[in-house]
Image (tube, rainbow, N blue to C red):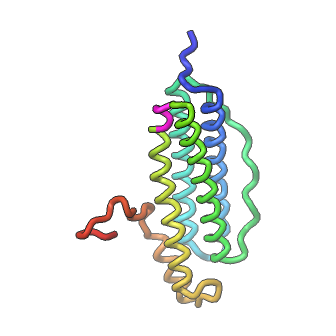
Amino acid sequence: MDTNRLSKQIENILNSQVTKEADAAQIYLSYGCWADSKGYGGIANYFFRHAGEERDHMMKVMQYIMERGGEVKITAIKAPPKNPTNLQECFEKTFKHEVDNTTAIYEIVNLAHEEKDWATYNFAQWFVKEQIEEEKLVMDLLDKLKIAGGPKASDESLFNLDNYLGKAPDDAPLARDASMDKPE
């Protein structure tokens, strides 16, 4: 008896997301190694933690496919992009990557809605919320770097930013959780 509750299109797009999450983990590992080689241990720590988070996302999608009776297909991932030339470029590339991932999540949501696959639609909502948080985290990094002086930031500012990121929380306050008592 066939127990697969996923259409072929949904199974394919979810398997594609498994690969995207694995790719994201590799990119973050690469950026973490680059940051460490430049002496930014705190920033490296930030990227290494987020590499693990991306692998957790990959596992969530894999587990969901299996729970719905589908078949997970592990495919090769491409090499990470070349190293950034500075922190500004690193954070900008990170933001672009997160926006691209958000677009991929929206494609899953749209397909699930189109197919009236409410289980997958519901499952994907967790990722929609997660992407809001991921984008905000990187926007906050870009803002902090801008305040520090952007590409012309002083060594002291970069030292402080590096220390901050080594200890920063891995989640961001979201507007959906704001209130008058706790605006952030």
Point 67% across, 35% down: residue = 74
Q: Is residue 59 left or right of residue 75?
A: left
Percent from the top left, x then y, of residue 71?
62, 26
Point 51% across, 33% down: residue = 64
The quarter in which the C terminus is drawn is bottom left
Q: Is residue 46 left or right of residue 84?
A: left
The quarter in which the N terminus is drawn is top right
Does the segment drawn in magenta span residue 151? no
The residue lying toward the viewer, choosing from 151 and 129, is 129
In the picture, residue 146 is in which quadrant?
bottom right
Q: Name, please, the residue furthest toward the left.
A: 181
In the picture, residue 87 is in which quadrant?
bottom right
The residue lying toward the viewer, choosing from 92 and 164, is 92
Q: Is residue 89 left or right of residue 122?
A: right
Percent from the top left, x then y, of residue 113?
52, 37
Q: Which residues are magenta?
A: 117-121
Percent from the top left, x then y, of residue 36?
62, 70
Q: Is residue 102 above or below residue 42?
A: above
Q: Is residue 92 above or below residue 120?
A: below
Q: Magenta stretch mostly in which secondary structure?
A: helix
Percent from the top left, x then y, of residue 55?
56, 47
Point 60% across, 44% down: residue = 107
Q: Is residue 95 above or below residue 143?
A: above
